Image (spheres, rainbow, N blue to C red):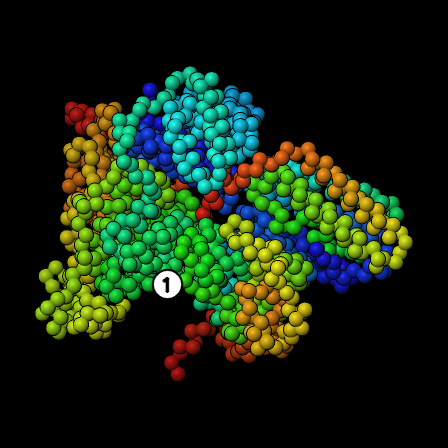
């Protein structure tokens, strides 16, 4: 994950909110892609979980957007998507054909942790009090999300211990 | 519209609706994201971009962008890309393919594109295997590698794509990988911006046929940025020295960038056209050339 | 009780349906049945739509079959993607996944009412017994064992063997899944019993292999010592067989940098005196044409296998077609005759490949073997083949006096000159693509060129008398005829049997030698024919046109041609034959009307 061209010391509240929204957008789009990949590769259980994550990210994004609009109306956005890379979005490498719901949830967990660490790492550089408060809040949100994923994980029956590769067909040459 | 009057594009403006056939986890998903971002940073309109590829999993990439795409035949993306660029030098021309497409069947063409120094950016997604046809040896596979056509191990030494291209005199040579997404996107952007032929070798793992050590985790373990080594990209010899470590180390960043880019082929063509146009007979009178004097 | 069943199964790559088909075929073979399995998939590497057809019979199988007797759909979306490849009729028993939540009377098959439709909770049974839904394929095998009496013991025996190294837990999980499927079938018997009768040949040795492996094995048997090639679907497995085995026979194989280098290396190996081969598909054949021309003018033996797929260009890499005929016969500029052979099944791929090497060696020429994706990738059971029946022909080498003042391209009575190779003292010569005199030295003389073209074309005349490279079945005097080659021949053989059973007077010609066109054989065949069809999977009706170039076909011999990936069914060919019969009867009646 990476950030390009953002000076945390001078980050305003509006920019911080916009940044948070973009982070959710990025994650949402990535989960959407993963859901589509899983559907295309006939892995419906993982697809279902990724769609659930799309909803989560979207919801959080909408909440942040509402706050932004309330405080700053439609003042032009300064931060852009080009400035962030995979802050909360799962790595492309995390997906696999035939992945189990457990693996899907572990991928989601990994990026909640990733996002949490991003906010933690950014905190010391922030000067604005309101921005600090926002980042603390977002950090806390990520911890909440981790708990949610843990709950879903706990609901899962243990994996069968049998590898999918023992049942699925060989890859098809094209 | 920004203050400067140029139309601003976002990464998603370069993404088409076609769903990739790539296996989930394929490195190429990250590569195409990097390309979307690079193109957005450059801000060229999608319809002014021609994206040419050969045959292979990675060669499907033009279809996943909103550029004009041409998914051609195995190993022949470069001649076709050159034809496009010569026919319309104003287009932004990109070429892409895999290590087999580029260095096996396509190997004969790279030297000549480099010699001509056309302003084309060539991106190779290098995964040391032939994925589309079910996992055969590729020209960059390590010696001793076991695949379905080398049950007893490959007896051939691998091609070094970086040295290959540097030796032929390319003006911009870089390597990238999804292990460093931001770096990859900015390297691709730099390559496209470079005025002349630019080559980016991207270590993009195959999750279906690749070995464990070649997956993202394995690649991260051997990667180093050239910047962190204090490498000066204007030093071609130093670049070639570092390039020898292809296969053992994953060096990321720009190996070589010509500090004084020479005129491109397109520049020379334009110069010639401008010089000679005043001598042109009107086309209706072209047969005057054959009038016996 | 049935003697023959055609199963068609579809799901996604993750369902292991092709793996199930393979287990079924192996089990059927173990139980003494004849079996054929074809597979088909979509354009994704993993997890795309995936299907297989398995035909099991107590008698030798002519072709993978037409309408399905049993259709298994693990989901409908994938099943329907295969369209005409999995044809369901009123005689089909349809088994599908209950978790699709589609009622039995609302399955999405348009315009057909199957014999019986059964929803089975396959995934649930797999989850419950094996702990993973992925064991669906084993449940299906259990259902098949229960309902159709195939593989009750043999399937699990095969699975045990296959998974032995992976641990007891996996084997046991499969066993439970299989038993559950079988139990379900026993508890829900079919309305009409479709058990297959026991095979009489149980215990007899059976071979199982596919067309690609068979071709490579035949080549090694024929003495091929070098293979040069490049990966291309659907021929890569031929090269793979060589990389696994040819070293054992003192030979070698090169996965070259491209198609041209692959055939180039083979041309080199042949020049060096060894039997050599390359294999490819359509795009590779196009690339290889210049090298083929070189081999033709240099009179070098070479075998080129083209496993045809949908064209043109990249086309349809995973579907079969017969549209490389023109390219096989005519590509490579200049006046060239290049023999073209075509097998029709996995079994005859063996003898046709040997024949290709014999022809290449005897006539000192490149020979093209036109296989196709269907034959190449389908697995068949075969009775053992007695390899002692095959004669292996080697190139004519110079000896004794012939090595004094040796002339490589010496005129002889049969136009074939003894061929030497580097290392043979006295036999030094220049081989080249440029026109040459008898010694091999370059020339641009028109007279010599004419003479050399004569040599290079007339030498093939005896090939046109090779009646053994043609198969005629049915009544030799029949007025209605079919001509078909390659995988379409199998469909026509079955159609012939069906038509004869319905009293039609029909015959079938299957050419194994497609080019040069043996006019005499065709003229003999068409002498009695009043109505006929040239049946092929090419959009341009290439075979029809090729024949018309060389012979006067009877005017009512027409073309029945269509693009690849649109399979012919025996039933539709029989219908076409009936149509020809009624046309014939009408025209006879017309002739019998008294003249006013």
Q: Decide if residue C201 is on the left or right side of residue B168.
A: left
Q: Position of residue C538 (x, y in %)?
A: 35, 44
Q: Is B249 situated above or below A164?
A: below
Q: Chain of mark 1?
A: C
Q: Quadrant of residue B137?
A: bottom left
Q: Residue at x 23, y 72 (%)?
A: C430
Q: Residue at x 20, y 54 (%)?
A: C359
Q: In the displayed image of the protein, which residue is found farthest to the front?
A: C168
Secondary structure at numbered mark 1: helix
Q: Which quarter of the image is occupied by the C terminus of chain C?
A: top left
Q: In the displayed image of the protein, which residue is found farthest to the right?
A: A129
Closer to us: A58 or B209: B209
Q: Which residue is mark 1?
A: C261
Closer to us: C134 or C46: C134
Q: Quadrant of residue C203?
A: top left
Residue C60 seen in render: yes
Q: Position of residue C406 (x, y in %)?
A: 14, 71
């Amino acid at each position: 994950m990476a950030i390009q061209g953002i000076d945390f010391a001078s980050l305003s509240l509006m920019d911080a909110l916009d940044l948070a929204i973009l982070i959710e957008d990025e994650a949402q789009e990535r989960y959407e892609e993963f859901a589509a990949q899983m559907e295309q590769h006939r892995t419906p259980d993982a697809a279902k979980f990724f769609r659930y994550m799309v909803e989560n990210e979207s919801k959080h994004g909408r909440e942040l957007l509402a706050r932004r609009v309330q405080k700053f109306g439609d003042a032009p956005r300064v931060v852009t998507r080009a400035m962030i890379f995979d802050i909360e979005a799962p790595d492309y490498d995390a997906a696999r054909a035939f992945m189990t719901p457990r693996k899907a949830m572990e991928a989601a967990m990994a990026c909640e942790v990733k996002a949490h660490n991003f906010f933690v790492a950014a905190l010391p550089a922030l000067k604005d009090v309101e921005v600090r408060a926002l980042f603390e809040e977002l950090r806390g949100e990520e911890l909440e999300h981790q708990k949610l994923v843990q709950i879903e994980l706990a609901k899962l029956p243990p994996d069968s211990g049998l590898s999918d590769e023992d049942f699925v067909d060989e890859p098809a040459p094209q | 519209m920004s203050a400067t009057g140029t139309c601003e594009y976002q990464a998603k403006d370069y993404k088409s609706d076609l769903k990739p056939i790539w296996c989930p986890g394929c490195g190429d998903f990250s590569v195409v994201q990097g390309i979307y971002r690079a193109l957005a940073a450059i801000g060229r309109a999608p319809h002014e971009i021609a994206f040419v590829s050969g045959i292979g999993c990675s060669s499907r990439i033009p279809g996943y962008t909103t550029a004009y795409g041409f998914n051609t035949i195995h190993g022949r993306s470069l001649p076709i890309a050159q034809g496009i660029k010569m026919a319309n030098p104003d287009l932004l021309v990109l070429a892409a393919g895999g290590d087999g497409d580029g260095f096996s069947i396509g190997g004969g063409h790279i030297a000549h594109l480099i010699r001509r120094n056309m302003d084309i950016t060539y991106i190779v997604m290098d995964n040391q295997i032939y994925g589309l046809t079910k996992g055969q040896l590729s020209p960059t596979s390590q010696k001793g590698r076991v695949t379905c056509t080398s049950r007893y191990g490959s007896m051939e030494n691998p091609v070094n794509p970086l040295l290959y291209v540097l030796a032929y005199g390319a003006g911009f040579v870089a390597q990238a990988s999804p292990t460093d997404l931001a770096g990859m996107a900015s390297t691709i952007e730099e390559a496209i911006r470079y005025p002349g032929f630019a080559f980016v070798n991207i270590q993009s793992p195959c999750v279906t046929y690749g070995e464990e050590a070649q997956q993202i985790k394995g690649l991260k373990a051997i990667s180093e940025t050239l910047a962190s080594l204090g490498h000066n990209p204007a030093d071609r010899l130093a670049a070639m020295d570092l390039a020898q470590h292809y296969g053992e180390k994953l060096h990321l960043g720009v190996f070589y960038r010509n500090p004084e880019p020479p005129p491109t082929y397109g520049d020379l063509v334009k110069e010639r056209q401008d010089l000679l146009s005043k001598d042109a007979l009107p086309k209706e009178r072209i047969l005057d050339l054959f009038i016996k004097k | 009780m049935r003697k023959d069943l055609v199963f068609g199964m579809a799901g996604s790559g993750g369902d292991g349906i092709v793996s199930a088909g393979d287990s079924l075929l192996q089990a059927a073979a173990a139980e003494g049945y004849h079996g054929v399995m074809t597979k088909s998939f979509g354009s994704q590497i993993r997890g795309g739509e995936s299907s297989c057809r398995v035909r099991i019979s107590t008698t030798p199988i002519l072709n993978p079959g037409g309408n399905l007797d049993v259709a298994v759909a693990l989901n409908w979306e994938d099943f329907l993607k295969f369209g005409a490849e999995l044809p369901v009729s009123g005689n089909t028993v349809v088994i599908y996944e209950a978790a699709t939540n589609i009622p039995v009377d609302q399955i999405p098959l348009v315009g057909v009412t199957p014999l019986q439709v059964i929803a089975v909770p396959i995934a649930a049974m797999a989850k419950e017994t094996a702990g993973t839904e992925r064991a669906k394929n084993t449940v299906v095998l259990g259902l098949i064992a229960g309902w159709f009496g195939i593989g009750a013991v043999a399937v699990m025996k095969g699975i045990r063997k296959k998974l032995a190294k992976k641990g007891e837990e996996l084997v046991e999980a499969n066993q439970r899944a299989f038993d559950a499927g079988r139990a379900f079938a026993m508890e829900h018997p079919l309305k009409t019993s479709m058990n297959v009768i026991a095979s009489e040949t149980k215990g007899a040795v059976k071979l199982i292999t596919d067309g690609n492996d068979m071709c490579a094995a035949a080549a090694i048997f024929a003495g091929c010592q070098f293979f040069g090639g490049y990966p291309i679907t659907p021929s890569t497995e031929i090269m793979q067989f060589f990389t696994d085995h040819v070293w054992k026979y003192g030979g070698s194989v090169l996965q070259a940098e491209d198609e041209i280098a692959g055939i180039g290396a083979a041309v080199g190996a042949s020049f060096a005196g060894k039997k050599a081969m390359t294999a490819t598909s359509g795009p590779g054949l196009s690339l290889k044409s210049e090298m083929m021309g070189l081999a033709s003018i240099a009179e070098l033996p070479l075998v080129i296998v083209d496993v045809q797929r949908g064209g043109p260009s990249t086309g349809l890499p995973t579907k079969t077609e017969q549209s490389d005929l023109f390219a096989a016969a005519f590509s490579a500029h200049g006046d060239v005759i290049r023999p073209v052979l075509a097998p029709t099944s996995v079994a005859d791929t063996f003898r046709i490949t040997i024949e290709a090497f014999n022809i290449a060696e005897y006539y000192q020429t490149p020979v093209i073997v036109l296989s196709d994706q269907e034959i190449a990738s389908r697995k068949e059971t075969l009775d053992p083949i007695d390899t002692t029946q095959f004669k292996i022909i080697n190139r004519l080498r110079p000896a004794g006096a012939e090595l004094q003042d040796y002339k490589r391209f010496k005129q002889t009575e049969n136009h074939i000159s003894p061929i030497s190779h580097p290392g043979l003292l006295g036999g030094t010569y220049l081989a080249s693509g440029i026109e040459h005199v008898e010694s091999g030295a370059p020339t641009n003389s028109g007279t010599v060129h004419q003479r050399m073209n004569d040599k290079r074309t007339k030498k093939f005349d005896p090939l046109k008398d090779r009646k053994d490279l043609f198969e005629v079945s049915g009544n030799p005097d029949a007025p209605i005829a079919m001509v078909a080659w390659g995988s379409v021949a199998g469909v026509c053989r079955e159609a012939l049997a069906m038509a004869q059973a319905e009293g039609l007077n029909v015959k079938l010609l299957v050419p194994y030698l497609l080019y040069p066109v043996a006019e005499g054989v065709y003229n003999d065949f068409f002498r009695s024919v009043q109505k006929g069809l040239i049946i092929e999977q090419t959009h341009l009706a290439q075979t029809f046109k090729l024949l018309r170039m060389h012979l006067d076909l009877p005017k009512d011999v027409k073309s029945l041609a269509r693009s690849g990936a649109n399979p012919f069914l025996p039933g539709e060919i029989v219908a076409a034959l009936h149509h020809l019969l009624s046309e014939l009867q009408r025209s006879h009646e017309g002739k019998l009307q008294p003249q006013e």
